[in-house]
Structures are given as C-alpha cells and as structure tokens.
Amino acid sequence: MAFRWVSPGCSWYEHHMLGGCQRPIVPPERCLPSLSTSHIRKRKPRLMVIIPFRGDSSSASLEGLCSQLPSHLDAQGVEFALLLVNQADSHPFNRGMLTNAAFAALHRQLVEGRKFRADWFTYIAVHDVDRYPDTRNRSCDRVTSAYYREPAQTPRVLHPTSYTGGVLLLRASVFQALNGFSNQFWGWGHEDNEFYLRLRQCGLPPSHAPEVVSCMKHLDCSECRKAKPANTLASLRAETRLIALVQERLRQPKLIVDDDGLSSVHFSLQNSSRRKQCGRHVLHILDVVLQRPTARLADEPCVADGGARDDGCVATVTPSTLPAGVVTCARNALPHKSQASRILRATRSRVMYNYRYEVDFVTSHNHSLSRSTAVYRVAICGQEWQPVTVPDTVRYQPIWRVLMPPRASNRAKRKPRLSKDFHYHGHFPCELSPPPWVTEPHSHQSAKLPSR
C-alpha cells in the first residue's frame, strides 16, 4: 500500500506550535549515515519491537498486546523479537530515555539470545503497550501489514500531523544516526515532538498511511492514565516545561542531537533480563533504573521566556515592555466607567503554549460628588502561537478581573471582588489557580498608559 509524507510542506502542528516549517538546505554531516544506502548490507529484514513500560508485567494492557500483536506479525510473515523495557525507579515516566536504554542494552549484549544481538535486527518499532492492530477487522489487514514491514529511509508514524508517538517504525541505522530520543522529557509526552525535529533537521520527514490510525486499537492503560497530566497546577507546569523544551530546541537546532540521546543515556539494570510468554512468543523484560539529572533549583531566577528553563513560573515584567495588545485588551476589560491612569505592576507566566499576563491598573471613577481611585488586576491569556494575521482580539483574551483591596489591613473589611464573565476562546488553558491578591500595590513600579 502507499504511504504519504506527513508534511512535505508544512503541517498544522508545525505552523502553529513549532514556529514554522524550516527544512535544511544541506543536512548536517551527522545525518549522512541515515541518508546513505551504500553502507546497508543486503540483510533479511528483522524487527525489534521495543515497548517502553512501567508497571506490573501481568497488567491487562500487556496481556492485550500479547494477545494481538505477535499473532498479527506472524500472519504477515514478519520476523521479530519482543523487548519490554520497564522503568523500575521512582522518577516520572521517560519514554524516550527508556527507548534509548533498550537500544543501548541490545548493543551492549545485556539481553541473552541470538535475536537480541545488535547485528540481528535491521529495524525497530518503538511501540506503546496500549496500542496494537485491530485483528478482528479484516479490512485493516492490508493497512497494518504494510505498516509493520521494514520502512525505507523515512520512518513511518501513526499520526497525520507531526507526531512520532504511538508506534514508530524506523531503520536501526536511522535511529542511531539521530542519536535516538532526547533523555530530558520526564513525564507525559513531547519526546515524540522533539524526535520529529530531529527527523526534520536531517531531511527525513516521516510517512503516514491515512487509514492506519483507525486500524490500531488504543486502550489507554491504567499506568498510562496515571502518567498523563491531571487537572492540577503542578501537572500543568510540568506540561509547560516540556513544551518550552521542545520550542527551545527549535530555536537552537544544535542542541537537538549533539549531547542528548543515545550517547548520553545513563541507566542500570535492577535485575537480569526476565522472560514472559507473549502469545506464542517470548517477551524479554529489562527492569531499568534511569539516572535523572538534578532538576532546576527553587531559588534560580524565574525566566518566563519560553526557553528551556521556563516551567510556568511567574516573572515580573516591566510595564513598558508589555505587548500593546495586552495593554489594550486588559484596559478594555475594566469596568465601563473606570479610567486607568497607570500600570502598577505586570507579570507574565507561561501555561503550555500560551502566556498569562496579569496587569495591575490604578483607576479613577468620577461620582456625582467625588472622585475615587481603585486598583484592578486583569488577567489576559496571550495566544502568541497564533499566526500574525490573527487580530489582537483573538490573540489576547481576558480571563478575569479583580478589584483589589488598597491595603493588607483592609482585606477583612473590603474583600476583593472577582469578575469572570469573560468568554475565553483559547485552544489551551491559561490558568487553573485562583486569582492571587495584591497586598501592597503601591510598592511596585508604575508606568503611564498610552492614550486610547
């Protein structure tokens, strides 16, 4: 069957989330082994299925895969071996590093058996435990059988945009030339997006069979659900950190491969390799302990710039450097009869692909007999990944407005009043925590507002 390129020009994900569709004019020298076919010997195609995993080897998800995948590969005449690499430490799940550890273990002959020597297999499948062919749907046989055959230079992916997750098929020589996955993606997801950048930089955008996604079962395993971000501020910050890391790699392509991947993976084996029956085949299991570098220290200065250190922390910004669209949107969110005179303070924090701005205004209000002042805080969601053609009314949207108490001593008497009657239409959330309160608003730097 035919496979098509995922994005010969530009996919939606690249355009909106990866800052554009750069393609190398001349691939870097390190990519040449993966682009050349002269060094590939005429060997029988043999597949090594690498399954990154965490949990009990008797789990229902593993039983489901064993009941479907081996028999399907046998029926299609694919010669293969099965290796499950189980993360046995207490760190967050790291799918990319587990795959690197499995590949390195095969080359170091840490798994017994002829099929687990590095010179036996010619290509690999990085295979999620909870996704496998739908063998009951006979119309899918043609699609999935072609998918599991040895690919050409360009890998095969399930997703028709820019993802390399789920079940990734690629030559072992290509995986080695790309230095494998990044080791830095602790937690759920985005290691596949970073790997897509590695492929793209080498001029190897993957191919995709249009029908393959619907022909691959996806039964979310219990351990997988636990690893995914929950609806909490801590998990949202973790997700933000991973997205920032991908986009940092996009800005500095040299960081993508050189010192992060197969060449720098550090792990140890908890036990010698184990065996488990998997259909009519044997599943070999490696229990690995990953070595995680020290995380960012709590006292390091916050940088909410979208770089690799950005983990969703709140950074103070100079009011005069705020985007004009933020100031306009925040000022329009003030009560109708309030007139803003200056900005006392402004902050910016990253939340996934968006930025949340919080702007404190000093406002005045003319009554019939007097003139009063008040401080309002307005939160704005900035969708700065939007194309430049999108108007500011879409790019910047108000989330909430708060009337702030003038002094901390008055909080009990004059409680803040929250307004959340704005209609936020963002693609991603901008805040999950409740609005914070300002206790000493007049201590912050201020700036005059531009005229309307």
Image (cartoon, helix red, strand yellow):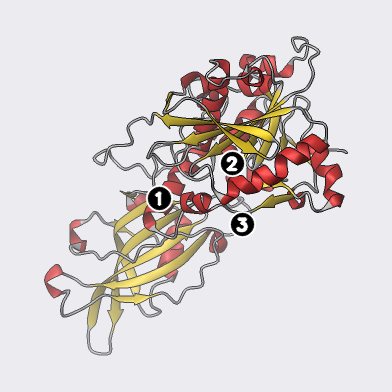
Q: The residue tagged with tag 1: helix, strand or loop? A: helix
Q: Quadrant of the N terminus?
A: top right
Q: Nearer the viewer, residue 391 or 192?
A: 192
What amino acid does circle 3 point to?
A: Val
- Which residue does the numbered mark 3 point to in the structure image? 390
Disc 1 or disc 3, which is closer to the eye?
A: 1
Rate crowding at label 1 as few (under 14), some (14 to 19) or many (20 or more) other CA atoms within 10 Å. some
Residue at horizontal 65 percent and vertical 29 percent from the top: 199
| Gap between marks 3 and 2 measured at Cα | 15 Å
Q: The residue tagged with tag 3: helix, strand or loop? A: loop
Mark 3 or mark 2, earlier in chain: 2
Is 443 drawn above or below residue 75 in the view shown? below
Q: Nearer the viewer, residue 75 or 332?
A: 75
What amino acid does circle 1 point to?
A: Arg
Disc 1 or disc 2, which is closer to the eye?
A: 1
Residue at horizontal 72 percent and vertical 31 percent from the top: 155
- Which residue does the numbered mark 1 point to in the structure image? 237
- Counting labels gives 3
- Numbered mark located on residue 19 in the image: 2
| Gap between marks 1 and 3 measured at Cα | 27 Å
Q: Is residue 4 visible?
A: no
Task: Looking at this view, name the residue that lies furthest to the bottom.
Answer: 368
Mark 1 or mark 2, earlier in chain: 2
Instruction: Give the quadrant of residue 377.
Output: bottom left
Rate crowding at label 3 as few (under 14), some (14 to 19) or many (20 or more) other CA atoms within 10 Å. few
Residue 145 drawn at (x, y percent):
82, 39
Q: Is residue 336 visible?
A: yes
Residue 107 drawn at (x, y percent):
57, 16
Q: The residue tagged with tag 2: helix, strand or loop? A: loop
What amino acid does circle 2 point to?
A: Gly
